[in-house]
Amino acid sequence: MALISESPVQELSSLLLGSSCRAGKAYMDEEKERISKEIKGKLTSQHLEIALAAFPFKIPNPLKTYSPRPDWGERIAIERLIGISKAATETDIDLRWNIITDGMFYADELHVEKERVVCYQEGIRTIAQTLGFKGTFTELDDLVEHKIIHAVPLDLDDPASEQYVLRTAGMMDTISQAALLEDMYMTGGSVACAVEKLLRTDPLFRKEAEASAAIYQARKRQVEDAEIFTRCFPNAVRASIQPDANRNLQDSRITRPLSIRITEKNGQNLFPWLGMGTTNGSTWHNAYVADLKREGKRPEERDGLIYFTS
């Protein structure tokens, strides 16, 4: 299969590496050269495949999300991917997205009910189909064997482990502690403070979070060792939605892949599954439900999807 000419390669690389598509900081020259070379090597006369992990499940923390179903935050994210694809057609290239959904793979470690994951995944696929999204969805559980893992729990009081325990705790199911978290949010002033206070005052939750954080890190390493991008998507450019692909990894490092932004703005903006979509009438972003309620915003529904507005 013949590769396309240099000009479209340069145009597409400029688009995908540019600020309108990029998640996180600008690429260094070495990163630009390496990723552009990968794009050129996998770009055919008609299309380019991109593989990335996204859309796991709605985080079951009552301060963060409103329901287990996708909302307008997820719709805006998929619309952004569609927008990137439309921009790529100006270079005569058809982008094809391979979305790896990892919710079921990490559900046990985060104490998330499987029904919640299924509800979210079905909703994501419905949104994608409604919008005419050109992409496939593959569950990570189908690509990597979910082996039993034994790991020494991380320690919240260890400076090297603290951030990973806090992040894991923020993803765990805390719906049964809604009232307590609400009180902690009101006194602490933020969702992060409430989660940390729960960790430091509830011995059982702390024990579960420290154990889950260790296994979550081990699962992350297992996925990297499985080389799913090379093995399962050999013709696709590896991408990440993370501004920093190493942010959630404690002991291993990943060479920065193509960084695709699925939020409306770079910087301080949540992924949709970490919060709720909200709009001021002209722009969209994602925020924690507790913060939206404190701002006086209320939930509304449009096209079967919830969002918050003034």
Image (cartoon, rainbow, N blue to C red):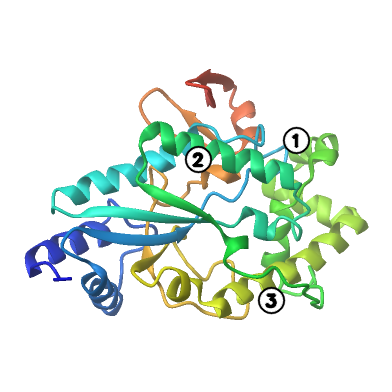
Q: Helix, strand or loop at disc 2? A: helix
Between discs 2 and 3, the one toward the N terminus: 2
Q: Camera-side residue: 48 or 301?
A: 48
Q: CA distance from mark 3 to mark 1?
A: 29 Å
Are circles 2 and 3 on residues that touch, CB within 8 Å? no
Q: Camera-side residue: 231 or 35?
A: 231
Of labels 2 and 3, the one closer to you: 2
Q: Helix, strand or loop at disc 3? A: loop
For residue 215, above or below residue 280: below
Q: Which mark is residue 186?
A: 1
Residue 14: quadrant of the picture = bottom left
Of labels 2 and 1, the one closer to you: 2
Q: Helix, strand or loop at disc 1? A: helix
For residue 45, above or below residue 171: below
Between discs 2 and 1, the one toward the N terminus: 2
Residue picked out by circle 3: 160
